[in-house]
Image (tube, helix red, strand yellow):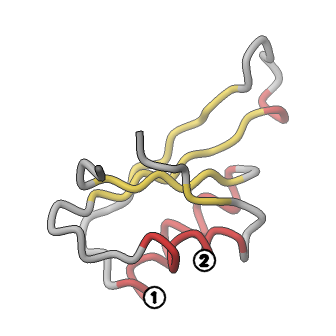
Amino acid sequence: MNDGRHVLVLPDRDAAEEVAQELADRFGVANEPQLVRDALAGEDDAEDAQWLVVVEDPAARLDPAALDDFAAEYEGWLEAPR
C-alpha cells in the first residue's frame, strides 16, 4: 500500500536535482520534492552515495510505472513501496 509518497533513487546529486525540477513540468507535482543523500552501507565517500527524491502524493494521482520510467531516463528507479 502506498502511503502517499514515492521515492525515486538516482545515481548522483546532479541527476536528483534535474529529476526534482522536471517533476513539476512533467507530472505537475506542486510540492517541492525532498532530496536526500543515501550513503551506501559502510561507505563514507560521497561518490558512493545514491540520492533519493521523495515526492509526496497524498491523493495517489501519480502513476508509479510512469515515475519508474522517468527515473530510468536518469539511470535511476522508483523504490517499491513497503
**Residue 75 at x, y percent in the picture:** 78, 64
Residue shown at 61% from the left, 32% from the top: 38
Residue 61, quarter of picture: bottom left
Classify mark 1: residues with Cα within 10 Å, few (<14), some (14-19) or many (20+). Answer: few
Classify mark 2: residues with Cα within 10 Å, few (<14), some (14-19) or many (20+). Answer: many
Three-letter amino acid code of the residue under disc 2: Phe
Image depth: mark 2 or mark 1 in front: 2
Residue 35: which numbered mark, if any?
Answer: none
Instruction: Look at the numbered disc 1 and give the secondary structure of its residue.
Output: helix
- Label 1, on which residue? 26
Q: Nearer the viewer, residue 69 or 35?
A: 69
Residue 15 is left or right of residue 42, and the answer is: left
Q: In this picture, is 42 found above or below 81?
A: above
* Residue lying at the far bottom of the rendered structure: 26
- Label 2, on which residue? 70
Residue 29 is left or right of residue 81, and the answer is: left
**Residue 79 at x, y percent in the picture:** 54, 50
Residue shown at 78% from the left, 16% from the top: 44
Q: In this picture, is 48 found above or below 20?
A: above
Residue shown at 41% from the left, 39% from the top: 82
Question: Which of the two labelled residues, at mark 2 and mark 1, occupies the earlier sequence position?
Answer: 1
Residue 19 is left or right of residue 74, and the answer is: left
Residue shown at 73% from the left, 69% from the top: 74
Q: In this picture, is 33 found above or below 67?
A: above
Do callouts 2 and 1 mark residues in contact (Cβ within 8 Å)?
yes
**Residue 55 at x, y percent in the picture:** 36, 58
Q: Nearer the viewer, residue 5 or 47?
A: 5
